[in-house]
Image (cartoon, grey):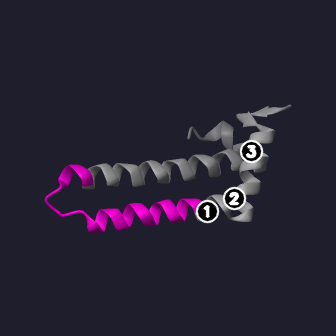
Amino acid sequence: MEKIGYSVYLSERVNELLEEGTLSEIFDLVDKDLRDEWVATPPQDSATRESIYYTLHALSLLRIKLETVVAQVRFPSLGDNYDV
């Protein structure tokens, strides 16, 4: 199997999940749960609020990484120009 930064199989599978909406739906559900938890957390509980913030940020980074895996198959030259 040809390598373009990531295996073609991995990139194609992630692409399928993104296109069918499965991953997007899961990301949206987790994002909503975290935001709801953040809203329900008292402002004085800064440790919990900070933890939720960092978890939301990590979720965002994961989404970006998955989109990057797909982009490297669609546009192989991107992997040469960007370090994600």
Residue at the disc numbered 3: 11
The three-letter code of the residue at mark 3 reads Ser
Query: What element does badge 1 sit on?
Result: helix
Q: Residue at x 36, y 67 (%)?
A: 36
Q: What's drawn in magenta, residue-wise? A: 26-48
Disc nearer the start of the sequence (2/1): 2
In the image, residue 23 lies at what x, y percent?
64, 58
Q: Nearer the viewer, residue 72 or 44?
A: 44
Q: Quadrant of the C terminus?
A: top right
Is there CB contact under 8 Å for labels 2 and 1? yes
In the image, residue 34 lies in the stretch drawn in magenta? yes
Report the Cα–Cα distance between label 3 and label 1. 16 Å
Residue at the disc numbered 1: 24
In the image, residue 69 lies at what x, y percent?
67, 44
Task: In the rendered view, tell whether residue 80 sits above or below residue 36.
Answer: above
The three-letter code of the residue at mark 2 reads Leu
Dominant secondary structure, magenta: helix
In this view, which residue lies farthest toward the right? Answer: 1
Q: How many marks?
A: 3
Disc nearer the start of the sequence (3/1): 3
The nearer-to-camera label among 3 and 1 is 1
